[in-house]
Amino acid sequence: MRSAVIGGGSWGTALATVLANKGDVCVWAREPDVVESINREHRNVRYQKDAVLPENIRATTDLAEAVQGAALVTLVVPSHVMRPMCERIGPLLSPGVPIVSASKGIENETLCTMEEVLNGALPRALRSDVAFLSGPSFAAETIARMVTAVTIAARYHDTAEAVQQAFSTPYFRCYTTEDVTGVELGGALKNVIAIAAGAADGLGLGHNTRAALLTRGVAEITRLAVKLGANPLTLSGLAGMGDLVLTCTGNLSRNRHVGCEIGKGRRASEIIAEMSEVAEGVRTARSAYDLSLREGVEMPITAEVFRMVHEDKPAKQAIRDLMSRDLKRERESG
């Protein structure tokens, strides 16, 4: 099977190594140095320079070349460029080829999930072929073939099964679900909570604080997801609690890193300017906050992350305001 991966960052590179177990892979990257290093040295010198990639992975800056003859296309671009990428790639694809989104985010302007973006930007004939990959999975550990489990979500079971078969290996196990909404929102919103968890760590707060943030974080994610039609059980699975725990506690988490630095007193804009890859939770914090207001769902942690990231609210004040809210029963909203 020949596959295409659109996006030459860390996660795109990692998924390319998984797909390389089943056949040739062509990675599309916008950076010429990434393409050259993959083709000449079997390394991604910009994003995963220490990892030796399988020899059946090659790269190109030509989008048409990347997808030509591909039996599977995986989109691994930042969420804010997913729509223009779909508009570019849609005319190059044929019906029947699964299109997998491995990006986690919500558009700022439209508040659309990636499913809604794909459905709006791809030709109608391709929309039954889309699936969404999410779950607790750091790129470096995936490339190192450490045991990983993820969820494949699709509205059509045949599509989910085809993608499941394509990605499953002895170290990368895939489960399927039809709850695209739950998987999409779990994957996007956990990045926001990870910024909060990082901020707590940056302030020097302990394990009690982190446990509280994770637990109340999954509660508010679930409230919004259920309001939008998700199955609450999805948020206790790999794409929900699993991904949340990893992103909030792992040192490889870009979103947690942003939070840690905010907790130390730095501004989000300064932190982001130093980063080579996107921390999706920064943009998603705005979308999630706006979505919570639109839907009338109380999401106090998300609201404080929005204020820390986009209004430079001090992390210490954000924690203080969270803790001084009106007391409630645990199963009440907020």
Image (tube, helix red, strand yellow):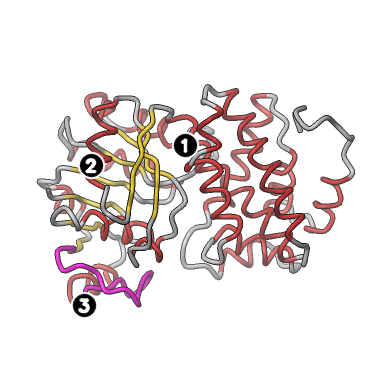
Residue span colored magenta: 41-57
- Numbered circle sitting on residue 41: 3
Q: Are marks 1 and 3 in contact (CB under 8 Å)?
A: no
* Front residue of this view, candidates 143 and 309: 143
In this rendering, position of residue 120 left or right of residue 303 = left
What secondary structure is marked by label 1? helix
User: For the point 37% across and 62% down, which residue is it?
Assistant: 146
Q: Are marks 1 and 2 in contact (CB under 8 Å)?
A: no
- Numbered circle sitting on residue 268: none
Residue type at tag 3: Glu
x then y, percent, for residue 327: 89, 35
N-term-proximal mark, 1 vs 3: 3
Residue type at tag 2: Gln
Residue 44 in magenta? yes
N-term-proximal mark, 1 vs 2: 2
Distance between the alpha carbons at the discs numbered 3 and 2 = 29 Å
Q: Residue furthest front?
A: 170
Residue type at tag 1: Glu
N-term-proximal mark, 3 vs 2: 3
* Residue to which mark 1 is pinned: 184
Of tags 3 and 2, which is closer to the observer?
Answer: 2
User: For the point 77% across and 65% down, which residue is it?
Assistant: 203
In the rendered image, which quarter is residue 49 located in? bottom left
What secondary structure is marked by label 3? helix
Secondary structure that dominates the magenta span: loop
In the rendered image, which quarter is residue 205 located in? bottom right
Crowding at dot 2, Cα within 10 Å, few <14 / some 14-19 / many 20+, comes out as few
Reply above or below: 103 against 58. Answer: above
x then y, percent, for residue 136: 47, 51
In this rendering, position of residue 65 left or right of residue 18 = left
x then y, percent, for residue 14: 33, 60
In this rendering, position of residue 35 left or right of residue 269 = left
